[in-house]
Amino acid sequence: MKERVLAAVVASVFFIIACATPAMRVATVGYQGTPGHEKDMSGFELLLNGWMGAWSMNFGWYANPLFAIALLLLLVGADRKALWVGTFAALVGLSSLTWFVQPLPSGSTSLAKLVYPSMGFVCWMLSLSSVPLTALELSSRHKASAT
C-alpha cells in the first residue's frame, strides 16, 4: 500500500507543478496568415479551458479525468485496470501535440498555433505516465510472487 500512496503523491506533485508552470508556447496567427504575438499558456489555464479543444478535434484535455480514474484504481489496488486506463490517459494526453498540425481557433479572427510544449507539459505527461508505470510494476510483482 505504501508504494501506491507514494506513486499517487508523486503523480499529484507532477500534476500540480504542471498547473503552476507554463505548459505551451502559443503564437496567435490571423486567418489570412498575418502574424500575431506569442505567449505562454499556463497549465492551469489549459486545465480550465482545455475541454473546449474538443470542438476543434483536440481531445488532450480529456486525459485529466482518465488520469483521476486511473489514480483511484491504483489506490484501491485494481492494478490491471489502472494500467489500461492510465495508458489510455497518457496516449490521450499525447494527442495534445496534434496542436502542432491543427491550430485551434482563438477568437473570431485568429488561430492559436502551438510553437512548442514547455516544462508544464513535460510534468503533465510525467504525472500521466507515472500511474500506468507504477501499476505495471506492482502487477508484475504480484504475478511474480504468485508463481
Image: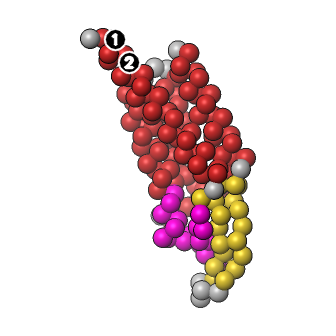
Mark 2 crowd level (few <14, some 14–19, many ≥20, 10 Å Cα): few
Side of 105 where 89 appears, left or right: left
Residue behind mark 2: 141
Height in image: 93 above or below 143? below
Q: Residue at x 51, y 57 (%)?
A: 96
Residue 82 seen in render? no
Residue at position x 73%, y 47% from top? 20
Up-down: is 91 above or below 105? above
Q: Residue at x 47, y 28 (%)?
A: 134
Q: Position of residue 103 (x, y in %)?
A: 54, 71
Where does residue 80 sit, x and y in percent of width and height? Answer: 37, 27
Q: Which mark is residue 96?
A: none
SS for callout 1 = helix
Residue matched to label 1? 145
> Number of labelled discs?
2
Magenta-drawn segment? 96-116
Residue 104 rendering spot, x and y as whole percentages: 57, 69
Residue 140 coordinates in the image, percent (x, y): 36, 22
Decide which of 95, 50 is in the foreground and name it: 95
Q: Which of the 4 image quadrants contains residue 17?
A: top right
- Residue 18 visible, this angle: yes
| Whether residue 144 is situated above or below residue 71 in the rendered picture | above
Element at badge 2?
helix
Question: Left or right: 146 with respect to 58?
Answer: left
Q: CB of mark 2 within 8 Å of CB of mark 1?
A: yes
Type of amino acid at the residue the image marks with label 1: Ser
Q: Residue at x 55, y 52 (%)?
A: 61
